[in-house]
Image (cartoon, rainbow, N blue to C red):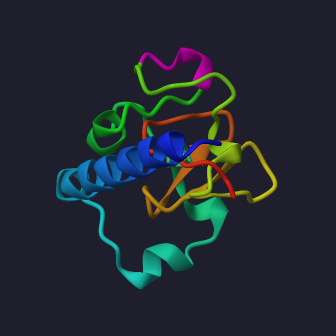
Amino acid sequence: MTDHSNDRSRRRFLKGTAAGLAALPVAGLSLSAPRFAQADDELERLSEDDPAAEAVAYVHDAADADDPAYEEGQICANCSLYTDEGGDWGRCSVFPGKLVAAEGWCNVWVPAS
Ligand code: SF4
């Protein structure tokens, strides 16, 4: 990976994180510890219509990504912000209290190191 792609990923991460955090009050989410402590079977799946999801162009299926930042092969499951819980859905640090699809994508995608 080149320094330029690292810079692009870093910029996308910072931009998407800022957009996601800005959308949190709209989505009614909080960063309180109890949300992080929820078991996966208690977590809601993130809706593509959620304002926080729309802010970062999130889709459940990366093949449906319609964002210029998308590059083939990028999916939530290979994003460093994704926590694999062993199923088709996992946690994402951008969306605390929600699950994202392993095959999903958003423009905050950061390569796993
Ligand atoms: S895990 Fe998915 S939704 Fe979360 S930042 Fe990465 S690409 Fe976006």
Q: Nearer the viewer, residue 92 or 79?
A: 79
Could you tell me which residue is drawn at 44 percent across and 27 percent down?
A: 69
Q: Residue at x 33, y 54 (%)?
A: 14
Q: Is residue 104 visible?
A: yes
Magenta stretch encompasses residue 98: no
Q: Is residue 109 visible?
A: no
Q: Which residue lies at the image location 50% right of the left edge and 25% below the top edge?
A: 70
Question: Which quadrant of the figure contains the N terminus?
Answer: top right
**Is 79 positioned to the left or the right of 25 in the image?**
right
- Main SS, magenta region, reads helix
Q: Which residues are magenta?
A: 62-66
Q: Is residue 65 magenta?
A: yes
Residue 63 x %, y %: 61, 17
Q: Which percent across, then down, holds residue 111?
A: 62, 48
Residue 87 x, y percent position in the rendering: 78, 49
Between residues 71 and 104, which one lies in front from this camera angle? 71
> For residue 113, which quarter of the picture?
bottom right
Residue ID at (59%, 34%)? 104
- Check the image and name the residue furthest to the bottom: 33
Residue farthest to the right? 86
Q: How many badges with numbers are in the image?
A: 0
* Residue 28 picture location, percent across and down: 24, 58
Viewed as shown, does residue 30 lie left or right of 63?
A: left
Q: Is residue 87 above or below residue 61?
A: below
Q: Is residue 26 above or below residue 71?
A: below
Q: Is residue 10 left or right of residue 110?
A: left
